[in-house]
Image: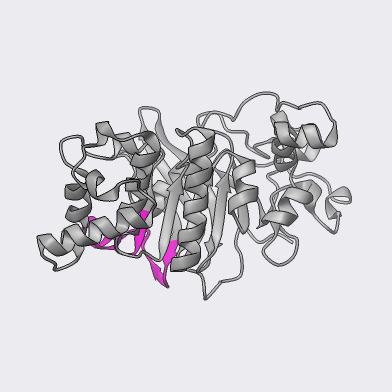
Amino acid sequence: MDTGGLHAETSDAVLSVRQLRTEFATRHGQVAAVSDVSFDVRPGETVALVGESGSGKTVTALSIMHLLESTGSIAGGEVIFEGRDIAHLEEREMRSLRGEKIAMIFQDPSTCLDPLFTVEHQLAEMLHLHRDITDAEARTRALELLRHVGMPDAEARLDTYQHKLSGGQRQRVMIAMALALSPSLLIADEPTTALDVTVQAQILDLLRTLADETGAAILFVTHDLGVVAEMADRVVVMYAGQVIEQGRVREVLKTPQHPYTAALLNSMPGNAAMTGQRLEAIDGSVPSLFNMPHACRFAPRCKHAFDRCTVEPPPVHELGSDRNARCWLSDPSESWRRQPAEVST
């Protein structure tokens, strides 16, 4: 069944993204980095947004936060947060939501923390912006936050500058800042990529614990399906700016319904080791935004592509509760076998 990329409206969702389209102005004209992206994030749920570099994951997250570069803008669709469409809010209104209701943890904390100010100053600044509290109260709250995220020797770290912190400690500061005002939605954009394996495991465990304690919804952006299996309740797979499959993590990882998802799983060293199969690579690369295939965007790299894949864009097929895939082969009725291909215009 073709749903046009939409799900039934989910009234209890903290975040409902509907047919989001984000464009950037270039010297060659407008180009869409994200198109027809739809998904939900519910209270207390962790949803992983996964795909290769260039798939549109980070652009989607930055669109939700209104943190796009000056050349970027939301050109269509809705971003419904707690029942309100925030896709086209003025910056002043959006600023009041950031930190207070929606917070973001970035991939590289060293580029987000100000090297000229102490950890306390930067935590207190956020608290002062949104709360009427004294300096002493802000320091007490900052210390509580650092202890809450497991910062070693937390009181001494308050007076420390970022260059004296390790990568894991910087990320703990970023997480403390994100949680300072108890937001209902936390967006984590590859927060463990720059960390070693041991520290990565600690940060992932910390995020899981904090989500359980606070009930916050988490949108976790990553390229690592191993992290998805460990962290997420549901997964949204992106390719070339579109959502190509989504569903509950166990279902998607066990029985992928899109060839791209299956190819990602087959390219994981852990999966190859368990199955005894040879590690596979996905031939080719994500297409350029300036030269996007006009039908199925994955067709040039897909081992299962047939004639229709190259002439007609596949619809989104609903495969059950919270499960869909954008692929001709995922049509449960297999009606594509009986219908002639229509050339896309």
Q: Is residue 95 visible?
A: no
Q: Quadrant of the N terminus?
A: bottom right
Q: What residue sits 76% from the left and 37% below the top? A: 271
Q: Residue furthest bottom?
A: 11
Residue 245 horizontal side relative to residue 135, left or right:
right
Of residues 165 and 29, the one nearer the viewer is 165
Q: What residue sits 55% from the left and 38% below the top? A: 55
In the image, is residue 141 above or below residue 292?
A: below
- Give the mark count: 0
In the image, is residue 73 above or below residue 41?
A: above
Image position, residue 160 (x, y; %): 21, 40
Q: Residue furthest front?
A: 153
Of residues 195 and 3, the one nearer the viewer is 195
Image position, residue 32 (x, y; %): 47, 40
Q: Which residues are magenta?
A: 79-103
Q: Answer with the quarter of the image where residue 147 lies.
A: bottom left
Q: Residue furthest top?
A: 284
Q: Is residue 188 visible?
A: yes
Residue 82 horizontal side relative to residue 233, left or right:
left
Of residues 285 and 310, the one nearer the viewer is 285
Q: What residue sits 11% from the left and 60% below the top? A: 135
Here the colouring is: one colour
In magenta segment, residue 98:
yes
Residue 42 horizontal side relative to residue 151, left or right:
right
Residue 330 horizontal side relative to residue 158, left or right:
right
In the image, is residue 112 above or below residue 180?
A: above
Image position, residue 15 (x, y; %): 47, 64
Of residues 325 and 143, the one nearer the viewer is 143
Image position, residue 197 (x, y; %): 54, 35
